[in-house]
Image: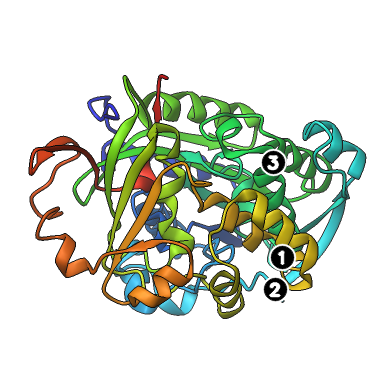
Amino acid sequence: MPDNTVRCISDDELRASLAESLRGRNLKKVLLLPPDYTRLYSGAGKITAIYYDLLKDSCEVDIMPALGTHEPMTEEECRAFFGEGVPFEKIIVHNWRRDIVKIGEVPGEFVSEVSEGLVSDKIDVEVNKLIVDKSYDLIISIGQVVPHEVVGMANYSKNIFVGCGGSSMINSSHMLGAFYGMERIMGRDFSPVRKVFDYAQENFLRDVPLLFVLTVTTNKGDETLIHGLYIGNKRVIFEQAVELSQKLNLVHVDKPFKKVVVYLDPREFKSTWLGNKAVYRTRMAIADGGELIILAPGVAKFGEDAENDRLIRKYGYVGREKILELTAANDDLKENLSVAAHLIHGSSDGRFSITYCTEKLTGDEVHGAGFGYIPYDEIIRKYDPEKLTDGYHTVDGEEIFYISNPALGLWTADK
């Protein structure tokens, strides 16, 4: 299991470090870019609240969660994530389809080089218009470094180019990662997608007053433990965070799992778009012919917006080769490559079975998307998340491996 015995940063130390990052700056207007509620255990909600408290009396502060393609946060979610001290009216909603400007292009030659010839199309670099708004003296990008299925290790410039990015960059980067292969990416720095982000950052964000605040965390139940805090605007802070995350958030197991049971906290996971972290983060540890059981009481849909949801329902999680064929033959997938990539990521390609256990999606809906189905209230009689703890268990004479939160780790078998 991840090692959460490494020293934690106290709240006093956290506040002192954040205050130090502002020292000597003459700030009149600041933009905070935290993740959204789907990064519940990032520590970023607390950090955002501290920054707001430090800045609110001396300058104007705007807060725009890096939603990417996710739904806007509700007022209740904002209070739960940021606390009562951050006014909901300060929250700006990022619209990845409309509120964006193009700031450059990553050349096709570069994309081809970093992808080993698998992709050769240019990538438009689009960001929310506020990122290039000259009225901000400082833009603080806040987020957690953790293994990720598209870019290898989440955050740093991904918070800008995907979290606050436009449809072209999101679609292109997700498909680039899918073509290259998750197993070659997850848990590693310098993936093709990360190299594209590095190129875009070096060439198109030079004049943006960015400050990155990166965390590395684990959790104990609902308690988030911040083990690493890295503040600055140079890539070295990301590399240091990657090194610690690889130590704390990567789990190497001696033998592949035959059966994995993953719980999706309903506060955090309301769609398979998010819930498929249960698939992404365990696939390298599951044996051929194995089983993945996903306990998903909060999952009520497939995509995070209506169009993505429609496309997932239409095509389903039918495997990499089939999705590539469907993408080549259908304009709606060609125009929504992030969905095509997501469908590739969410399939086991027939290597192991995936069963979603829901109470808000019907069996017909789940089967229609290509997954197995067991009603949630039925499955928890056998696998009760109130009683199970992370790790191995024997249930009815069968060994299972239980994971309470797939978002905080990456499991891989030393085969």
Q: CA distance from mark 2 to mark 3?
A: 21 Å
Q: Secondary structure at mark 2?
A: loop
In terms of image quadrants, where is residue 246?
top left
Residue 284: x and y in percent read: 45, 33
Q: CA distance from mark 1 to mark 2?
A: 6 Å
Residue closer to the observer: 339 or 99 = 339
**Which residue is depicted at the point 64% across and 31% down?**
235
Q: Amino acid at mark 2?
A: Arg
Return the disc, 1 or 2, that comes first in the chain's sequence. 2
Q: Is residue 384 left or right of residue 185?
A: left
Q: Is residue 307 visible?
A: yes
Q: Which residue is mark 3?
A: 193
Residue 26: x and y in percent read: 61, 52
Return the disc, 3 or 1, that comes first in the chain's sequence. 1
Q: Secondary structure at mark 3?
A: helix
In terms of image quadrants, where is residue 85?
bottom left
Residue 301: x and y in percent read: 43, 74
Q: Secondary structure at mark 1?
A: helix
**Which residue is depicted at the point 52% across and 37% down?**
231
Residue 154: x and y in percent read: 53, 42
Q: Which residue is mark 2?
A: 97
Q: Which residue is mark 1?
A: 167
Q: Could you tell me which quadrant the N terminus lies in?
A: top left
